[in-house]
Amino acid sequence: PQITGAKNIKWVHSFSAGMDRVLTPEIIKSSVLVSNSSGVLATPIAEHVITYMLIFARGFLASLKNQEKRIWQKDDTLTELYGKTVLIVGVGHIGGEVAQLAHAFGCKVIGVVRSPKENYGTVDEIKSPKDLEKILPRADFIVSCLPDTPETHYLFNAKKFKLMKSSAYFINIGRGGLVNEKDLIAALKKKTIAGAALDVTETEPLAASSPLWNMPNVIITPHHSGTSEYSMDRAIDCFCLNLKAFLGGKRLPNLVNKKLGY
């Protein structure tokens, strides 16, 4: 948003969790308070992530293609989520919900967080960002839930993909800028990793010419993992909560750190 000439603006609220489009240099330098709707989409996005995982584990990509061709063919490579290791990079509201659902399926959950605390509910292990490269080789599913900031931009690149298991699946529901897409495409072509599920891409909409569309081991959804008939009601409740705090002169519950970007 542009605030040039708008002398009375004191607060900007976003109905989105990601702030990369809101935090313009002008907004960052100003005294304007910024809040977001972090947490309101956690339930549908976490269910979306688990759906990705089940599709990969139960071989639905191949089964649905066979159905279109009326081919009855069993797959002896099917597996289950039970016992798998899920690495969640960014255990905020969404990552925490993913952890809870993954734990219910019997997965071991490892979380990477900027400032580790003692209790993260159903997360079995908590690691800091400096440990990421050490724990990537342990994960069967890597779930990226981070915002796109100067610190996280292109976090997932060729080096990170090479550290993953060849049987691992990469899932991104954070922001497209977290991933070097050329490196991801190369890793998928070389079978450095088993597959990827992307609800966000570097450029949106994803270009029709992108190889990702036709890759047999890739799931593309059009940045709608947070969509639900309940999403707007939750977003409005969140806004009202922050509005009440603003009018009362209290700290906004969803106040964004403009320097950190979230």
Image: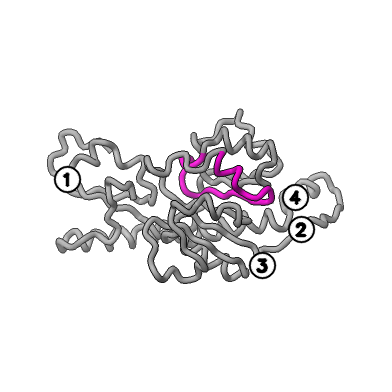
Q: Which residues are magenta?
A: 159-179
Question: Nearer the viewer's eye, disc 3 or disc 4?
Answer: 3
Estimate the spatial distance between the alpha carbons at disc 2 and disc 3, rounded to whole Å: 12 Å
**Which mark is drawn over residue 82?**
3
Task: Indicate which disc, 4 or 1, sits on the residue closer to the N terminus.
Answer: 1
Reading the image, the residue beneath label 2 is: 78
Front-lying residue, 78 or 1: 78
Q: Is residue 168 magenta?
A: yes
Q: Quadrant of residue 106?
A: bottom right
Q: Which residue is found at the position 63% from the left and 38% from the top? A: 187
Reading the image, the residue beneath label 4 is: 64
Q: Is residue 108 magenta?
A: no
Which kind of residue does numbered mark 2 sit on? Leu
| Residue 98 rendering spot, x and y as whole percentages | 52, 62
Reading the image, the residue beneath label 1 is: 31
Which kind of residue does numbered mark 1 sit on? Ser
Estimate the spatial distance between the alpha carbons at disc 3 and disc 1, rounded to whole Å: 49 Å
Task: Indicate which disc, 3 or 4, sits on the residue closer to the N terminus.
Answer: 4
| Residue 5 rendering spot, x and y as whole percentages | 15, 34
Mark 2 secondary-structure assignment:
loop
Which kind of residue does numbered mark 4 sit on? Leu
